Amino acid sequence: MKKIFLFFLVISVSTASFAQTKWAVDPMHTFINFEVRHLGISFVDGSFKKFEGTIDAAKPDLTDAKIDFTIDVNSISTGVEMRDNHLKTDDFFNAVKYPVMTFTGTSFKKLKDNNYELTGKLTIRDVTRDVKFSVVYGGTAKDQQSNTRAGFKATTTVNRFDYNLKYDPTGQMVGKDIKINLNLEFVQAK
């Protein structure tokens, strides 16, 4: 009887050790930003205000993380309403036909210290391409309500023409490369 009890105890501890941990993005402490060259002499900054994101992981270093993110294209903001409305047209995102952008992580590889490489599938409009983000993991902390939080900074650059964002095909007025900067904070599910 004692051996059976010990067997079930070991199984329970092993299962608990490898249980999936779920995290949800905190929209109050997360920022989805981008920048693009304008006329080759300056930059226009923008952001997306509505999004959802999750992380599922069993390992403490998150190297087995499954990351999913959805961005509401209609929440784009550059601080100029006329430009924001133009970005929602078929010249760029076509928000009516393609109202969301998605990212699905396929690999989260630890490089050195708190530096990671996140690889995944980014879908904009009707195009899905592989993309790599450089990620700095800020660690975890407890907030005032004893929630565990994790912080990340992720950056990448994509070519907008790869995603059929076809306005100004010469790239002289609006640059072809879009730098994406993400400041992310996730809350662990209880």
Image: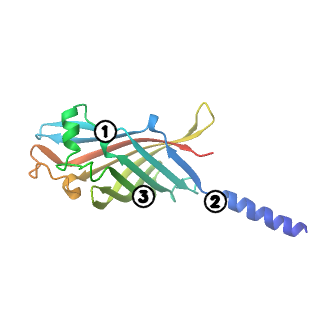
Q: From this viewpoint, which residue is outermost toward the right?
A: 1
**Number of the front mark, 1 or 3:** 1
Q: Amino acid at mark 1?
A: Ser
Nearest the viewer among 106 and 163 is: 163
Please, which colouring scheme is shown?
Answer: rainbow
Residue 172 at what x, y percent from top left? 9, 46
Residue 176 at what x, y percent from top left? 17, 50
Residue 35 at what x, y percent from top left? 25, 41
Are circles 1 and 3 on residues that touch, CB within 8 Å?
Answer: no
Residue 142 at what x, y percent from top left? 59, 36
Of labels 1 and 3, earlier in sequence is: 1
Would you name the residue on which mark 2 appears?
A: 18
Query: What residue do we see at 74% from left, 65% from top?
Result: 11
Of labels 3 and 2, earlier in sequence is: 2
Q: Amino acid at mark 2?
A: Phe
Query: What residue do we see at 32% from left, 57% from top?
Result: 123
Left or right, 128 with reference to 2: left
Q: CA distance from mark 2 to mark 1?
A: 36 Å
Image label count: 3
Would you name the residue on which mark 3 appears?
A: 105
State which quadrant residue 32 falls in. Answer: top left
Pointer 1: residues within 10 angstroms few (<14), some, or many (20+)?
Answer: some
Q: Secondary structure at mark 3?
A: strand
Q: Which mark is residue 47?
A: 1
